[in-house]
Amino acid sequence: MSGAIIVSPLERIGEMAARHGCRQMVSLMAAGHDFARPGMIDRHLVLRMNDIAFAGAGDLVAPERAHVDQIIDFARQWADDGPLLVHCWLGVSRSPAAAMIAALAVAPGIDDDRLAQALRAASPSATPNKRLVALGDEALQRGCRLTAAVKAIGRGRECRLNAPFRLDLDDLAIARLRHR
């Protein structure tokens, strides 16, 4: 699989879809946070969850394995008709985690450390949701490599809103081949 994944905060999804020619999108939003889907998006997965790391937080919905399985299935059906757009409210936690899961679902040969480093280079503010990462690690049978790689890059810098960023899967696959 070649291509790119665009990660964005909610307020910039229309701009990112138009700028990058995205036709497919994953939205990770809390219940009740409604939004308008950009018109050029033909295929859309909406997952309702809060940005929390533990289940049992009152009325909040923690990321669950079913959410991760849907991300994986959606990514594996991603047509090569442009980048995949992934967003959450701020573009800091849920969407970076989902982007990593999607990348590894379609390109399992990508090195987990290289992916985490590429994420950090693209977004100094990204702090992938730990629960989504752990569930993705398990679902994709990464042997805790994804969890360890995300832990190694540490927490991103503080921000109010993350700037959109791009993960180029072709570049990550090339890096994987060079480091063998």
Image (cartoon, helix red, strand yellow):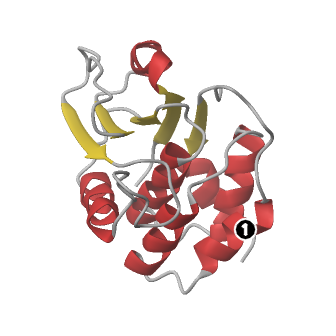
Indicate the secondary structure of the residue bearing disc 1: helix
Depth order, front residue of 167/56? 56
From the image, which quarter does the C terminus lie in? bottom right
Q: Residue furthest front?
A: 58
Q: Residue furthest bottom?
A: 143
The residue under the point 69% across, 75% down is 148
Residue 16 seen in this snapshot: no
Left/right of residue 123 with respect to residue 19 in the rendered view: right
Depth order, front residue of 55/147? 55
The residue under the point 26% across, 21% down is 37
Count the marks: how many?
1
The residue under the point 49% across, 66% down is 54
Dot 1 surroundings within 10 Å: few (below 14), some, or many (20 or more)? Answer: some
The residue under the point 44% across, 35% down is 87
Depth order, front residue of 120/162? 162
Left/right of residue 125 with respect to residue 173 in the rendered view: right
Question: Vertical placement of 7 versus 73: above or below?
Answer: above
Question: Vertical placement of 66 versus 80: above or below?
Answer: below
Question: Vertical placement of 80 versus 109: above or below?
Answer: above
Q: Quadrant of residue 64?
A: bottom left
Residue 128 seen in this snapshot: yes
From the image, which quarter does the N terminus lie in? bottom left
The amino acid type, in three-letter code, at marker 1 is Lys
Percent position of residue 26, x then y: 33, 40
Question: Vertical placement of 145 versus 163: above or below?
Answer: below
Percent position of residue 84, x then y: 39, 38
Percent position of residue 32, x then y: 27, 31
Percent position of residue 21, x then y: 38, 21
Residue at numbered disc 1: 151
